[in-house]
Image (spheres, rainbow, N blue to C red):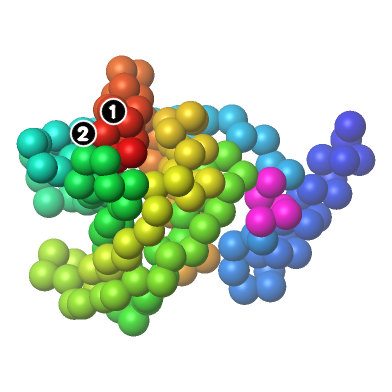
Amino acid sequence: MIRIAALLLTGLVSACAAGGPPGPAAVAALPAAAPAPIPGYDWHFTPSEDSVYLAYGVENSDELKIGLHCSPGSGRIELAAPAPKGSRVIHLESGGEMERFDAAGEPSELHGGDFLTAGTAAQQPVFQRFRRLGWLAQWTGGQRETYAAHPGSEAGVERFFARCG
């Protein structure tokens, strides 16, 4: 058991030393244990008649880590996330599933970087895993940030995907 853990750790260190996040094989080998929720941050579900929005950030503020938007039944998600200046990829992970989404970007008025947007299918494996586990991670500039639901807010994640289709 210790030998297997050492091999996994060596593979992860090698992948990170190569200048970026670990590849899908290294991430798939990691346990899918839920990360701890961050105090003050949570997933916030906001429905309306013609759209649904799921955002991870501080409630009633401009502090947003990532936002997901869709029209009910469309099966399509629009992603929005702040990023370093010049970045044009939103790189997400959940429980071993990883996906990179090519994004459009524009200068952000809220921080010194850019604001990225991308569209994709709601059935992407990374989103289906997020739906089951209640947490999503974003890789930015080689750093991983995890966005875990606090107890009770997982229901908003499920409602978002149920309404998106």
Q: Which mark is residue 39?
A: none
Question: Which quadrant, please, contains the N terminus?
Answer: top right
How many other residues sit within 10 Å of disc 2, few (<14), some (14-19) or many (≥20)? many
Marks 1 and 2: in contact by CB < 8 Å?
A: yes
User: What is the x, y in percent for residue 102?
Assistant: 41, 71
Residue 29 is a magenta residue: no
Question: Where is 30 relative to 80, above or below?
Answer: above
Q: Amino acid at mark 1?
A: Arg
* Residue at which label 2 appears: 45
* Residue 159 tag number: 1
Give amino acid for label 2: Phe
Q: Which residues are magenta?
A: 24-28
Furthest-bottom residue in view? 86
Q: Nearer the viewer, mark 2 or mark 1?
A: 1
- The percent position of residue 99, horizontal first and vertical second, equals 52, 58
- Residue drawn 17% across and 71% down? 108
Quadrant location of residue 86?
Answer: bottom left
Dot 1: element: helix
